[in-house]
Amino acid sequence: MSKIPVMEIFGPTIQGEGMVIGQKTMFVRTAGCDYSCSWCDSSFTWDGTGKNDIRMMEAVEIWEELKRIGGKNFSFVTISGGNPALLKNLDEFIKILKANQIKIGLETQGSRWQDWFFEIDELTISPKPPSSKMETDFEILDEIIGKLKQNDVPQQFSLKIVVFDDLDYEYAKAVHFRYPEVPFFVQVGNDHLSTMDNQELLLHLINKYERLIDRVMQDSDMNNVKILPQLHTFLWGNKRGV
Ligand SMILES: C[S@@+](CC[C@H](N)C(=O)[O-])C[C@H]1O[C@@H](n2cnc3c(N)ncnc32)[C@H](O)[C@@H]1O
Ligand SMILES: Nc1nc2[nH]cc(C(=O)O)c2c(=O)[nH]1
Ligand code: SF4
Ligand SMILES: [Mg+2]
């Protein structure tokens, strides 16, 4: 059995972002990313600062830990990272979840494909805008979205773009135009990643949320768009493992 680099396992909590916001879920966060976004809120998964927390685990060990932590209080598991799509061998873990009637969410940036994407119930693809300093390979993204569209098993997928500034907003629009039929979300960027003052952070992010809403409201190119904050950040600030 091959092993999976796991950064953290936590929950149950709410999915704070995107298409299934509010969903009660456990989280499995894998280590390692092929990107290094300037504003990554989970940079401990790839920048070395979390290396002592990484555990190499077998799929069944992750499942055992989920049950140990979550007890009977979950039926949904969200896989995030880092970029879980780097891990071909996550298919074993996904098989175990399926066998136990657990619904599965995935957070990934759309830079890599894995065949096990077809098994994900709620798949979020989050291509990165210019402020991240990453560059989107649209050939790969086209391929990923093309494959997902052809899947005949029931599966939801969506696009979610984090917006920090004007250029990001234009990028979001371009992605929405490229894939107009894919459910589309814009998400408020958190640029206060190190504050522990939750009240101050909440006010700051609510303000940014309102400004993003105002902008979309006045933009006829963005009529079929959903605008969301990171709800978990409103509740628990920059705390890890929530
Ligand atoms: C930490 S990433 C892990 C999954 C995958 N690497 C990705 O980026 O989609 C999970 C989500 O958090 C978002 N995110 C990361 N840093 C953020 C920040 N500072 N503000 C808002 N969203 C952020 C990402 O865009 C992504 O949608
Ligand atoms: N509650 C909660 N919701 C989330 N949605 C996406 C997350 C992520 O880091 O991928 C995340 C997270 O870390 N916590
Ligand atoms: S792709 Fe995701 S995990 Fe990787 S650096 Fe960017 S936000 Fe962080
Ligand atoms: Mg997060």
Image (cartoon, grey):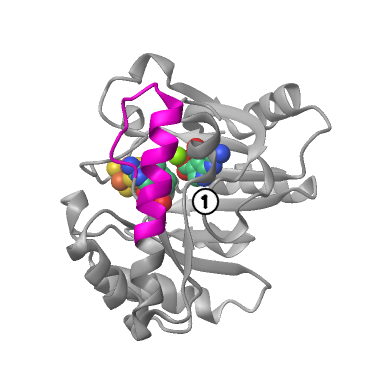
At 28% from the left edge and 40% from the top edge, which residue is drawn? 191
Which quadrant holds the C terminus?
Answer: top right
In x, y percent, where is residue 79?
A: 54, 44
Is residue 70 placed above or below 37 in the rendered structure? Answer: above
Local crowd size for mark 1, using a 10 Å CA cut-off: few (<14), some (14–19), many (≥20) = many
| Vertical side of 182 occupied by 10: above or below | above
* Furthest-right residue in this view: 72
Q: Nearer the viewer, residue 220 or 177?
A: 220
* Closer-to-camera residue (194/128): 194
The question of residue 187 being in magenta is answered with no
Q: Position of residue 211 (x, y in %)?
A: 34, 59
Q: Find disc 1 in the rendering and name its residue.
A: 17
Name above or below for residue 83 compared with residue 227. Answer: above
Picture coordinates of residue 12, whole percent (x, y)? 69, 33
What amino acid is labelled 1 in the image? Glu
Please name the predominant secondary structure of the magenta segment in the image.
helix
Q: In the image, is the residue at mark 1 within 8 Å of ligand 2 by its beta carbon?
A: yes
Is residue 83 at all visible to an observer of this figure? no
User: Which residue: 26% across, 66% down?
Assistant: 169
Side (left or right) of 101 relative to 11: right
Write down the quadrant of residue 32 in the picture: top left
Q: Is residue 11 left or right of residue 89?
A: right
Residue displayed at 30% across by 40% down: 40
Q: Residue at x 21, y 50 (%)?
A: 132
Is 204 contained in the magenta span? yes
- Say if residue 204 shows up in the picture: yes
Q: Which residues are magenta?
A: 190-211
